[in-house]
Each structure stands twice: as structure tokens, then as C-alpha cells.
Image (spheres, grey):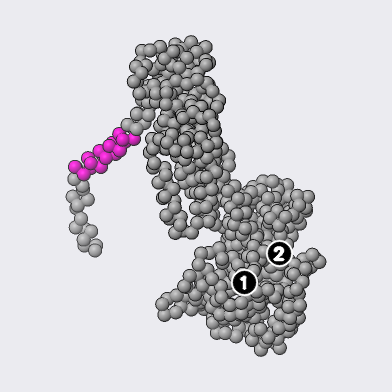
Amino acid sequence: MSQDSSNLSAADLRTSAGRRAWSAGARWVFALAAVATVLVSALIIWTVASGAWTFISQVPFDSLTEIGWFPRRGLFDLSTLLVNSVQISVIAMLVAVPSGFGAAIYLSEYAHPRVRKVMKPALELLASVPSVVLGVFAISFITPSILTSFFHEINFFNKLAAGIAVGLLVIPLIASISEDALRAVPLALREASSGLGARKVTTSIRVVLPAAMSGLMAAVIVGFSRAIGETMVVTIASGGGDTSLFNLALTESGGTFTSAMAALGLGTDQVAGNNLAFQSLYFLGALLFVITLVLNMLGDLIVRRLRNKY
Amino acid sequence: MTPEKALMTQEPDATAPEVMATAETVASQHPRIDVSGAAATPMAANRADTQTVFRCDDVHVYYGDFLALRNVSLSIAVHEVTAFIGPSGCGKTTFLRCFNRMNELIEGARVEGSINYHGVELYQDEVDPVEVRRRVGMVFQKPNPFPKSIYDNIAYGPRLAGAKRSELDDIVERSLTRAALWDEVRDRLKTSAYGLSGGQQQRLCIARAIAVQPDVVLMDEPCSALDPIATGRIEELIAELKTDYTIIIVTHNMQQAARISDMTAFFSVQANEMGQRTGELVEYAPTSLIFTNPEDPRTEAYITGRVG
């Protein structure tokens, strides 16, 4: 042993120059990948922001409060799109939160491990249904087969069907995040509750749900962001046209931020150069971006305030 | 003992005669007590007069196909501290969790044999485990307060049992006082229980358990996560609570068992040819006897520190 080490020369501990260069180069390859991502994000923000600035600096302000959203006629009523977006997202949450939480409680608290192993992936499969399919589902099933039996006069394209379809889309997202939050609640808390003579349903509602509150709120906020940003379902089921008259009726059609952007972005109406219609696309994009950002920050704040260390 | 805590009033009247009957037969239930104990020490002689809370006959516990604990028969006397000691894996915690049917929360757990609680067979279909757990409370190894305020932690059980809002303040104060925690937390009842130290949290858990006025308190190594000073306070508390409650405690600490318990059960573990380790009861006797004059060589080896 001691003889071996005395025979060691510096050459044995040296490495080849190529290997050294590769080690140093790898660092730059990975750094480039990271920087590229940030750069693309910055580029998007800059494009959207500059387009939105063009719009906001040139648009007559009284055209922002008009009878509806008719970009090619220079009528850019924002409240129309905002109301429709909020209405559809709220309907979606009314559908997705109860069923998502319900599914999460079942999977986390009641389901046998074998059942959960099959059911959770099945639930997440719903998330992989393309949104265009759900949009078609809304106009081919939800409206004609369900809604027509409740409402005598309902537009073929309507916000209610769009909201329900977006809700279906968001269920697996909310269920999956909530289930993770519920499962993170330590078993010891459930045992403490059972040990005091609480039934399973009481333990779930009074101990596990409050303990997981921060995660559940996160699920709701992520779900809402997803709903307000959903484009295809809404475009197909409610706001297919690029124009929209202000209305509050859920049985009527109505465009949202996203569907209005989709309609403008398709470009088939040759909106470019026509008033400020094309620039309004960027403005809507910027607005949506800000709304989502504020929602996420709000969510972060709520989550941090409710956070429990178990 | 306060009148409302009397065991008899907590049970349906029909079972009352049976309680007396079981009490009279305690002494003959266990040969160890009968043969040497009853004659040798005054304490054991008294056992014929004490009431029996639990009487276990030939209890086996399985997890799936695995036999975790075999052939346990013993009786637990009212208002005594009974300690379960033994090496890891000997089934003492498993056995403890039989008394309030907590084992049922584990998938595949099964109890065979008879556990009789004040004359009522615990493991029969008619018995609702939830009702059992209201009478047989539990304190766990690691303090596990709810992520709620100190007040809401204590009020949790009474609220479940339907206590009125007007009674809660009293219950909270009484329970915390009983658990020797009131003076330390009276000014911050509405703050999170997580602001308390480990020892305080464990006393909170004891207060939470006794807030529902149980008959028995099961303690599963309640001091194992605590420092010696906090441990000392819990031990004082146990000695004090004994006047109102029957206490069964699992402990790894033999000195602790010797200090606080009236009766001690020593469990051991044996592996079969397939390597499955099954626990069994080796010896059950008054604590003073177990630690001075154990009958079984395995008990002696364990308490003198030669094995385990």
C-alpha cells in the first residue's frame, strides 16, 4: 500500500485536456438553455407590451366603454369581455371546485389504495382530453341534450355551456392538486381526531380539510387561472364570432378576452391596418397577462397566510 | 373521583351487575396474581376488591396473515396505572391500540379473542368504535395537536360530543388546569398550538384527551419525544390523573414504568421458523414485584439490562 502510493506520479492524477474542455463547456450549454427560456419570455412580454402601448396611446378612451366589442368598427367595450370572462370562469369553478374537492377527499380519505392507484390516473386522463374536443362536446351535447330541457330560449352558442365545459376541463387539475394537499396532512392528525371519537367524515371535514387549506386554495387559484385563460372551449362554445354585444344573460353567446384574441389572431378578417383592431389583440393579451399575474400573486399571499406547519 | 365520572353512569344500566361480577373474578383470572401475588403483597390482595375495566382473554392480533401478537390474557383495574414494557416489536403498542379499536384504522388489522370492557364485548358488530373512543381516549407517541388554536384543540372533542357553546370555556379551563398547562397558556388560548414547546404540546394533547371526560386514557410512549424535564412533568401529571382515570401506558423506559405504574406487563417477541416476529405476554404482575422479584427469567434478563 505504502509502496504503491510512493510510485504515484503527477501524470496519474492529470486528466485529458478534452475532458476538461467538455466539463467547462457543459456548464455553458446548460446556462444557454436557461437564458434562452428567460429571453423568450422577455421577448413575448416586450412584444405584447409595445403592441398594447400602441393601442392604448392611440385609442379614443370613450370607445373603451361602448355597447359591445366590435373591434373593426372601433368599439372596444372592455366590460363586455371582462363580464363574459368572469361569468364563464365562475361557472367553471362552480362545477370544478365541488367535484374536484369531492374526488380528492374520496381518493385521499376513503379509497382503498388499489382503487386510488387506478382512479387517480383515470381522473388525470380527463386532463389530457384536448380542449377542442370539450368545446365540441359543449355544442354537441351539453347545450342540445341538457340545457335545452331547462331553458326554453337558449342560444346555440352560450356562456353556460362554455362555463360547464371549462369546468370539466379544470376538475382533474383541482382534484389532483387537492388530493396531494390532503395526502400531505400527517396521519397523526387523523389518528388524534379518531381517538377523540370523531367519525371519518368529521375528521375529513374538521381536521384534514382545514389542515390542507393552503393547498386547497392553491388548487382553486390555479384552476381559476386555467379557466380564465382557456381559449378553445370558449371560442367554440360561446364566443366564436369576433364581435359581441354586452349582455349579462348566461343563455346568450358572448366573447371573452381569450376568444376575442383568437378571433383577431386568426387574421381571416384582415384586421391588420383596420383601425386599431389588430393592436387591440396585444392590449387584450397584456390585460389577461396582468389578471393572471395578479391572481397568482393573490394566491401566493393567501397560501402563505394560511400555511400550516403540521 | 367526581360523581359524574363514575364508570357506572357511563354505561347502560343493564351491564352494571356484570361489572361487579367481573370485579370479583379478577383475582382468579391471572395465575400470577393468584398464586404468588395475592398472598405475598397487600397490593395484590386488594385486587379482588378493585373493579375491572378491561378483561382480555386469549387475544391474538393479525395484520393480514401476519400474527403480530399472540395469546394475551390480562385484566386492567380501575384507577390504576398499568404499564406495558418490552423490546421493540413485541406488540405492546399493537395491544394498546386494541383497547379503543384504533387498530381498525390500519388496513388488514384483525383482533381475535375477547376484550371485555365493563362487561361489554368490545369486538362485536353492535359496538361502534366511535363510542368506544369517546370513553377510551388516547395520547400518542409524538405530540399531535391540530393546526388550530389552543382553545379549539381542547374544544374539539367536547364539540363532537355536542357540548354547548356556553360550556366550552369551562371545559377548556378545567381540562388545561387538570393537565397542569392552564397557567402557562391562559393568556394565549386563541393562538396556534404550534407555538407551544414539545412538552407543552404533549400536555395539551393530554388535556384534549381528558376534555371529553373519558373513562380510560391510553398513552403510547407519551414521553419518548420529550426531554427529561418535560418527561418529569408528564409523569407527575400521570400520577395525579390516576385518581380520576384508568391509565394504560406503553413505555420503553423501564425506570418510568417503575416510577409511575401500579401494574406492569412485560411483553417479549419470538421469531418463528419463517422469521416472522410474534409478540407475547411473558409476565403480568404488580410493578413492585416485576422489578424486584420477576418470576420469568426473560423478564429478569430484560429488566436487568442483559437483553433487549
Label disc, if present, on residue B214 of the rendered structure: 2
Task: Report crowding for label 2: few under 14, some 14 to 19, many 20 or more residues within 10 A (C-alpha).
Answer: many
Identify the element where label 2 is drawn: loop
Mark 1, residue position? B124
- Mark-to-mark CA distance, 1 and 2: 21 Å
Residue B22 point in image, percent of width and height: 71, 80
Instruction: State left or right for residue A215 relative to residue B22.
Output: left
Residue at x 67% of width, y 79% of height: B286
Residue at x 30% of width, y 34% of height: A32
Residue A277 point in image, percent of width and height: 41, 16
Task: Report crowding for label 1: few under 14, some 14 to 19, many 20 or more residues within 10 A (C-alpha).
Answer: few
Residue B291 point in image, percent of width and height: 62, 79
Image quarter of the N terminus of chain B: bottom right
Identify the element where label 1 is drawn: loop
Instruction: State left or right for residue B61 relative to residue B53.
Output: left
Instruction: State left or right for residue B142 relative to residue A141.
Output: right
Sequence order check: which comes first, mark 1 or mark 2? Answer: 1
Chain of the residue under the numbered disc 1 shown in the image: B
**Residue A75 lies in magenta, yes or no?**
no
Report if residue A109 is visible in the image. yes
Residue at x 74% of width, y 54% of height: B163
The kind of residue on which mark 1 rests is Gln
Q: Which residues are magenta?
A: A17-34
**Residue A23 lies in magenta, yes or no?**
yes
